[in-house]
Image (tube, helix red, strand yellow):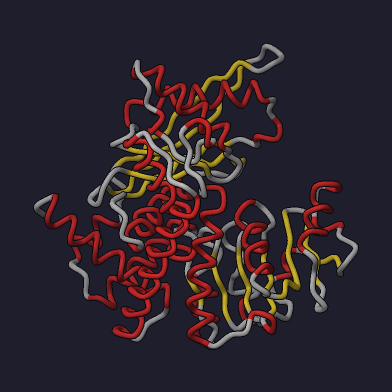
Amino acid sequence: MSLFENTLAQIKRASDIMSLDKDIATILSNPMRKVEVNIPVRMDDGTLRIFTGFRVQHNNACGPFKGGIRYHQQVDFGEVMALSVWMTIKCSVVGIPLGGGKGGIIVNPKELSEGELERLTRRYIRMIAPIIGPTTDVPAPDVNTTPKIMSWIADEYSKFVGHDAKGVVTGKPLENGGSKGRDKATAMGGTYVLNEYATEKGLNPAETKIIVQGFGNAGSIMIELLTAAGYKLVGTSDSQGGVYSADGLDFAALTACKAEKGTVHAFEGGKAITNEELLVQDCDILILAALENQLTSGNADQVKATLVLELANGPTMPEADEILSKKGIPIIPDILANAGGVTVSWFEMLQNADNKYWETDEVNAKLKDIMVKSWNDVKGNKEKYNCTFREAAFITAIGRVEKAIKENWKI
């Protein structure tokens, strides 16, 4: 099953449970606009290369399209479509007035010089500029895209329209219109939700073992936040492999190892294991903060955690969902758990529009309010429909989008 088929299956399950109007389900299953561009870039050696880029605008019934741009050699149209749908759902589940979009370029950015990467970015933005804008479609960082790349986007788009328009993109550096707290927002939002769950279940952090797959921005910050709160980290990983120790892993030492050797897989304070092995090690909470399709029908029955939290997009396949559900292992889904990122991106849009900055404490307080309310909304629908957290999150979001479509589109 492809990622987009997975997404459609999720919509169908929620639609069936809530008896959704079939016309609304059809609208949600079909992105409003799909754009593919061939991007010519002059390389440093004088040769010309053509890169393929995408931008998908799924639905804007609730507000402007919103979603990141990823640079990865395995990006394809189906993946970008799926991610655009999830952005619609994600924005709606936390109740912010935005729709869903997503973009990507098929490229391994590690193989490009900074100059080549900048030329690629600027040309891509020139080619999609007619369909994006501060009140139309606002991109953001995603896999392998950075605040510096967001600055290039803001600058190039501003040149295209002939005036300052830094609000066209979020995730910018603070000195160029970014928001305080944005760098930690995804992990912070996930932490707020996890704290609500832990409090309700009476979990003692000091007695709770966590594994975090992924030591990138979201994963490493999640580890930092949770270990500071007393949780015991027993395993983590990056693209090169993982490390596990039932006695616990020191975050500061892991960070130093990553900086020095380029991977936590080389950490000597635990047993070196593969990413696949990491997922089935003994722990209480398994946090997925890497890429899509990590839990499948082939490994879900071996998961030993009592809770799975998805900080990455789409890390659990539908078959794995069913297996974990039958085992009584709840999943706090991506569309809720990682919505802190887009929520603070919305805060950045508001600050850009008012030409002001909010202090970090204000950003975090507003984020906590939204994440806690969203958790309670989803939990309420879980109890109402006797369904999973994922199904309840989709039901919560789809209900809001349905109302917006009927009121704003007069359908």
Q: Is residue 20 above or below residue 314?
A: below
Q: Quadrant of residue 290?
A: bottom right
Residue 202 lies, in percent from the top left, at 55, 88
Residue located at (64% from left, 79% from top): 205
What is the quadrant of the C terminus in the image? bottom left
Residue located at (41% from left, 17% from top): 159
* Tag count: 0
Of residues 189 and 49, the one nearer the viewer is 189
Residue located at (48% from left, 76% from top): 196
Furthest-right residue in this view: 268
Residue located at (32% from left, 36% from top): 353
Residue 369 lies, in percent from the top left, at 39, 65
- Please give left or right for residue 398 compared with residue 128 in the image: left
Q: Is residue 123 above or below residue 26?
A: above
Of residues 344 and 12, the one nearer the viewer is 344
- Please give left or right for residue 118 compared with residue 254 in the image: left
Residue 287 lies, in percent from the top left, at 61, 69
Residue 220 lies, in percent from the top left, at 67, 57
Q: Is residue 157 above or below residue 304?
A: above
Q: Is residue 383 above or below residue 228?
A: below
Of residues 126 and 19, the one nearer the viewer is 126
Furthest-top residue in this view: 46
